[in-house]
Amino acid sequence: MENMTGTVPSSVTPYSEFKNHIGEMVTIKGAVHNIRDMSDFAFIIIRTARELIQCVYSPEFSDYRLDEKLVEQCAVKLSGKVVKSETRDGSERYELQIHSIDVLSTPAAIPPVVISKKQINCDLSVNLDYRPVTLRNPKERAIFKIQEGIQRGFREYLSQQGFTEIHSPKINFAGAEGGTNVFKLDYFGKQVYLAQSPQLYKQALVPVYERVFEIAPVFRAEHHDTSRHLNEYISMDFEMGFIESFTDIMNMETGVLKYIMELLKKEYAPEIELLKVEVPEITSIPCIRFKDAKDMCVKKLKNITDMKDFEPEEEAFLGKWAKQHFNSDFLFVTHYLSKKRPFYTMDDPEDPEVTLSFDLLFRGIEITSGGQRIHDYAQQVEKMKKLGMNPEEFETYLMLHKYGAPPHGGLGLGLERLTMHLLGFKNVRNAAMFPRDINRVTP
Ligand code: ATP
Ligand code: MG
């Protein structure tokens, strides 16, 4: 064998290059997505990583002889001549006149769901049951290409802003977010928990790197079957030190979101077009205090009984309000009640009943919670005690405070939630590649 040089030889021509090869022979590799036999000729659609390429078979110009062995989902290497094709809208398209087809593999069975139609036409549960197959449908895969763009934008922007990417452990000694939705795990006879968030670790890394971020799965034992909760989701988190105010975090998030939306428009245009995504224009994001938002909800909506938090219909109302008054798809709600925020949240020194925290609503649903954290040791211990927690159990977490930490804060942004609302889905499962919910752990 020869030495490895790091160059993977490519014998294929990407579709984007076809315009430079009109009239020439090129080779592509892909899956047979669809065959439309027109008796004396046939359209064979090849699915590559991001495109559908129309290829035309005719005994007139093909050395290859089409027979029943070539079926949808065959993996092929195909050579053909590039020709400009007719389009109804006058846009430039290219197709291949097939010269030869080399069948690299043949499926053992016909897919259980038709994937070569414009979209998957079956119930969501069936779609999810056959996910490895249904994701091959161009619209389905476009969802997760866009999701990739969101993560990429988050990573790129924060890297540019001096953040360090981290990975925190997912098997933990304690839950970070409180509540009953923590998964317990038997760890060689000892009880441990699956991470509800990277909170305790990202904070610990602020005195180390000052600014950190993580994109990773987190686990929530949601006991209800809702359209917005998964039991495992991807959390995009960041934490930043030396903040002047908790609004620094909101400004940073605004910057992240602007960057993500621009990136999507620039580099994910085929998917945006395919899914007809309305990418929000962000110039600035309006803010409202929790109390003011609550007063407005109570005035405008009937039967509001929970004065400490929002019901989904209140969030939806606030989303519409932000659109009407500020023409914004986003709204920051700030100063949530201290009682309703986790133990690490900093209370407002001007009014300890409320916190220096916020949620971000996107089109009327929460996608982010964030805020300033307590950095003082005595203050954090006292708050834990007040909440009935035992500070000794959090000894390793409290090292952060004990040995000195700058003022800091951060946030968690649910990737599937953001994708769901960007794409206008009613159910978060549409925006999860292999969702985990109360009834589903497969595929
Ligand atoms: P909610 O009130 O919507 O249940 P939360 O306030 O319990 O969410 P946080 O701990 O604030 O959730 O998590 C931060 C973000 O993570 C949320 O704003 C949301 O985008 C996302 N998120 C939280 N729980 C889930 C879940 N079970 N499935 C999918 N995304 C979630
Ligand atoms: Mg929240």
Image (spheres, rainbow, N blue to C red):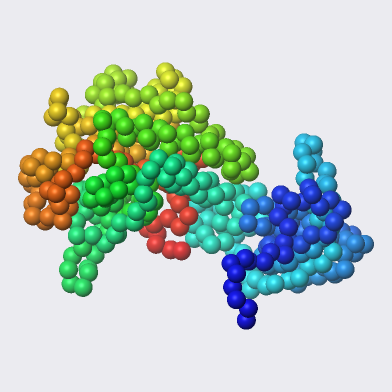
Residue at (8, 42) in percent of width and height = 378
Looking at this view, is 342 or 377 the one in front?
377
Can you say whether 132 is above or below 157 in the image?
below
Name the residue furthest bottom. 1
Q: From the image, which quarter does the N terminus lie in? A: bottom right
Residue at (83, 43) in percent of width and height = 86
Quadrant for residue 427, please give it.
top left
Q: Position of residue 361 (x, y in %)?
A: 37, 33
Q: Position of residue 129 (x, y in %)?
A: 49, 60
**Number of callouts in the render?**
0
Q: Position of residue 440 (x, y in %)?
A: 40, 59
* Residue 320 seen: no
In this image, 409 relative to 256: left or right? left
Quadrant for residue 355, please give it.
top left
Quadrant for residue 311, please give it.
top left
Name the residue furthest right. 60
Looking at this view, is 67 or 176 the one in front?
176
In this image, 103 relative to 327: left or right? right
Residue at (29, 38) in percent of width and height = 370
* Residue 284 seen: yes
Q: Position of residue 305 (x, y in %)?
A: 22, 29
Residue at (24, 47) in percent of width and height = 207
